Image (cartoon, grey):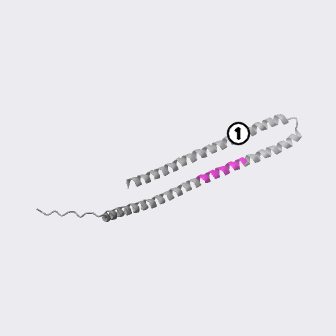
Amino acid sequence: MPSEQPAPELTTRDVLLQVDRRLTLIEEDVRTLDHKLDANVDHLDQKIDNGFEKIDQKIDARAESTENKLNARIDGLETRIDSLEIRIDDKVDSLGSRLDGLDGKMLAGFGDLRREMQTGIGDLSKEMNGKFVWILGVVLASWISTIGTVLLK
């Protein structure tokens, strides 16, 4: 019969050294994951910032265009008003009917302008909402991917 040799017993020091080594490996993995996560978050932040900057530029361009249109209409209205002031001095009797006609045109012009502005604002809102949903989806997908990586590691 072969003589049985007792297995060497592990000392507390051996167990603690094994635990320390395993904790060191886990800590290195967590640091690596943390660096990767920081890089991904920085990249995503940059993409979001770029997206918002593009949206801001579009909003600024559309606001400027609307302002230019509004200024042109106001200039036109100011010209009309000036000519009407001259006519008022000359034709006081026909003032009532002419002012009623101008009021209708001005209200229609302002109504059209209001509708155009509301349409433009609605379009901008839809566009911003759509881009926000995409950005939120990308952020959520990245977060889920990161959490999945952490949990599966």
Work out whether residue 5 or residue 111 is closer to the camera in this orientation and state it. Answer: 5
Q: Which residues are magenta?
A: 54-70
- Please name the residue that numbered disc 1 is placed on: 111
Q: Is 42 displayed left or right of 90 in the figure?
A: left
Query: Toward which corner of the image does residue 5 lie, by quadrant?
Result: bottom left
Q: Quadrant of residue 118?
A: top right
Q: In the rendered picture of this protein, how many numbered marks are placed on residues?
A: 1
- Residue 106 position (above or below residue 13): above
Residue 46 screen position, x and y as percent: 53, 58
Question: Which SS class for mark 1?
Answer: helix
Q: Nearer the viewer, residue 53 or 44?
A: 44
| Residue at the image position 51 percent from the left and 59 percent from the top | 42
For the view shown, which residue lies furthest in the left direction? 1
Q: Residue at x 88, y 41 (%)?
A: 89
The N terminus, quarter of image: bottom left
Q: Main secondary structure of the magenta part?
A: helix
- Residue 104: x and y in percent read 76, 36
Q: Residues within 10 Å of mark 1 (few under 14, many from 20)?
A: few
**20 and 145: which is toward the camera:** 20
Which residue occupies 35% across, 64% down?
Answer: 21
